[in-house]
Amino acid sequence: MEPHDLEAYLHEHIPISRHMGIAVVQADLARVTLRAPLEPNINHRSTVFAGSCASVAMLAAWSLVLLRVRDAGLDARIVIQHGAMDYLTPIDGAFSATCDSPDEAVWARFMRALERGRPVRVDLTAEVESEAGPVAKMTGSYAAIPPSKG
Amino acid sequence: MEPHDLEAYLHEHIPISRHMGIAVVQADLARVTLRAPLEPNINHRSTVFAGSCASVAMLAAWSLVLLRVRDAGLDARIVIQHGAMDYLTPIDGAFSATCDSPDEAVWARFMRALERGRPVRVDLTAEVESEAGPVAKMTGSYAAIPPSKG
């Protein structure tokens, strides 16, 4: 799945991501970076609405799980179970959220569970940045549920 | 500020809230309830996108702070500093987020700080429900910053 495929997938299946202007900057097994402009996500203070910031961060991490599961030739329903955002400073322009992959050992354990038809969870972080530097941070727990358990 | 005034305010100043179809069901000093339909917030599984769920919950709690600050005749920049979501179950239809006011003593302390020109924080929760019952829960820390500190 190339970056433009992921972008098309998000825009088609999660239409609010299109309204948010989310673009895929990088999408591979090591990292997913999503970007969004200020304008469609603006709030009453002309900075980024916290819900848009959370949405972009959550989708970056969710997309990394999707890419990993597909790369392993598996299928699973991927859902966020818990997500926490720390907002460091108002965001007054375009912003991006980057989810870096955890160690391969995490994924090895993860895929073994899925292959055995067992639900499994992974904890991920996403860093949100603007031109000014870091602006927010997300930590999220994502569950992957095999089709038979769906 | 009546419910329809709050709705107009949100739609005008936070335009993504209009795309999400957010409606104000109740908005007073005791409680804010916001509601949103499934369709504009749908995801690849035909359930509600977690980012939309978080957005509605965050706006419910933010709106309660706004109403409280305005009712006290004060002005402040109200920003979320930390927000955490627990997602209990997929949401397969319209949903609402309700933020109930904490005790009056919390607001008394809060307004005293603002009146003295000091930034102050309040912790709030918002319960998200669908027809099926509770579906998610948010806890958020909101800061109010007086204009002179803005």
Image (cartoon, coloured by chain):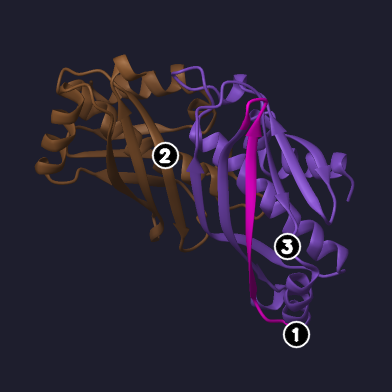
Chain colours: A brown, B purple
What amino acid is at disc 1?
Arg
Q: Nearer the viewer, residue A95 or A100?
A: A100
Determine the CA span between mark 1 and mark 2: 40 Å
Residue A34 position by quadrant? top left
Determine the CA span between mark 1 and mark 3: 22 Å
Q: Nearer the viewer, mark 1 or mark 3?
A: 3
Does B81 sit left or right of A108 as displayed?
right
Determine the CA span between mark 3 and mark 2: 26 Å
What amino acid is at disc 2?
Gln
Residue wearing tag 3:
B102
Q: Earlier in the sequence, mark 1 or mark 3?
A: 3
Q: Secondary structure at mark 1?
A: loop
Residue wearing tag 1:
B116
The stretch of residues the image draws in magenta is B116-133
Percent position of residue A127, x then y: 34, 52
Marks 3 and 2: CB-CB under 8 Å? Answer: no
Residue B74 position by quadrant? bottom right
Point 27% across, 32% down: residue = A65
Residue wearing tag 2:
A81
Point 71% across, 33% down: residue = B35
Q: Secondary structure at mark 2?
A: strand
Does B38 sit left or right of A92 as displayed?
right
Q: Secondary structure at mark 3?
A: loop
